[in-house]
Amino acid sequence: MILFISQQHMRPFVTVGVLLFVGCQPHRDVGALGNVVFSFDRCTVLTGDDPCSPASEKVAARSSANIVVSSANGGKVAFSSVRSTQPTVAGFTTVDATTISVQAVGAGEAGLELVRSDGSLLDRDGVSVSEPTALEFLRIDDASPLLVAENASVTAHVVRNQGPMLLAGRGGLTFSASGSVTLDAPSPADHDDRSFRGEPFTLHGSAGAGTVGVTDGALTNQLTIQFVNAAQISAVVITNPPSILTKNGKRFVIADVEARTSDGSAVFGEACAWTFSGASVSVSNDPDIADLLPLFVDDGAGIRTIFQTDGGTAGATCTIGSSSVTLDLNP
């Protein structure tokens, strides 16, 4: 399985594995009449040349997605209504002047038609809807429980697959929790992200273990969660050597560490208690480097922290429970 998990404390963004999720590529559908350009606002990276066009994406049944329209000839797209040629496959509603919501119903093909105020057809495109065959917790090994720090809030994702293909669309999934797991509303930032990352779910819990279940029609999957307290952390390790970034005349140091249990397993959601030595140094929340603190983690439980320093010799120590590691902030 493949994990895609975000945490309250920002983490390093590293893309690994077979499946990638990125913002839409510069590939679009030009409508049948040549007047309108159609594209999904979020898209999966699929095999083919047009990963963001409605013609190349497949939307999961019982989910929803947004299509953005623009003029193929410049100017505004002037349409007054939208309609579906196959409402039992997909319905369409207008969100705003450039966005159309797709409500996927059942497998098949549906035509999306944009209609002018006089009733004439402005342009037409198509949407493909598929029935998922599997639900996947992204980048999570089902053979072992996911280790999460007690009382930390983490957000993971589920995607719908049809064979090896990722299906676009969100919504329509039912989540449940048992044991020590409590489900929360996903972070608003998750929904603001530009790329398709599946369906988010956010959880927290105290001592013990529990499960998260997900259901879509006849499909089900379950994830086991084990909560870990600070006393169970046996090591804090540096996962990426500190690196220096200078931006807008400011000097920043980027550092990544990870909390692990005695068997070497990584723990999600832990936070460092930082202490400093040497020259002036502080944890930075500078907006100039906000884009370096990604919302989601692709392949681990690393804790990314960005420091601002004056360039002198300085160190920072991360302590979690009785374990600690010291970083040289003048590499």
Image (spheres, grey):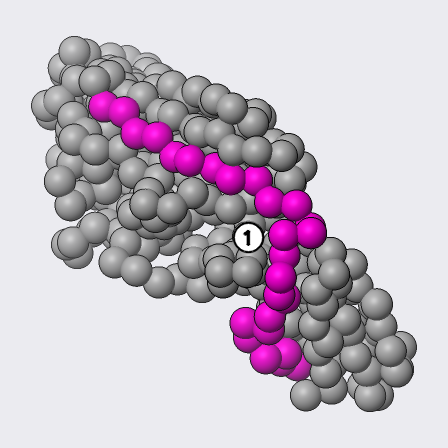
Kindly indicate the quadrant of the structure image that contains residue 71. Answer: top left
**Which residue is rendered at x = 24% and y = 16% of the image?**
217
Residue 316 percent location from the top left of the image: 78, 74
Which sits in the foreground, 212 or 323?
323
Residue 233 shown in magenta: yes
Q: Is residue 65 visible?
A: no
Residue 300 shown in magenta: no
Which sits in the foreground, 173 or 269?
269
Kindly indicate the quadrant of the structure image that contains residue 153. Answer: top right
Q: Is residue 47 visible?
A: yes
Report crowding for label 1: few under 14, some 14 to 19, many 20 or more residues within 10 A (C-alpha): many
Which sits in the foreground, 209 or 328?
209
**Image height check: is 40 above or below 319?**
above
**Which residue is rendered at x = 56% and y = 44% of the image?**
148
Residue under label 1: 267
Q: Is residue 63 left or right of residue 56?
A: right
Tell me the amino acid under the disc marked 1. Answer: Val
Which range is magenta?
Answer: 219-247
**Which residue is rendered at x = 39% and y = 35% of the image?**
223
**Which residue is rendered at x = 49% and y = 63% of the image?**
264
Quarter of the image for the C terminus: give it.
bottom right
Q: Secondary structure at mark 1?
A: loop
Which sits in the foreground, 192 or 328?
328
Residue 310 percent location from the top left of the image: 84, 81
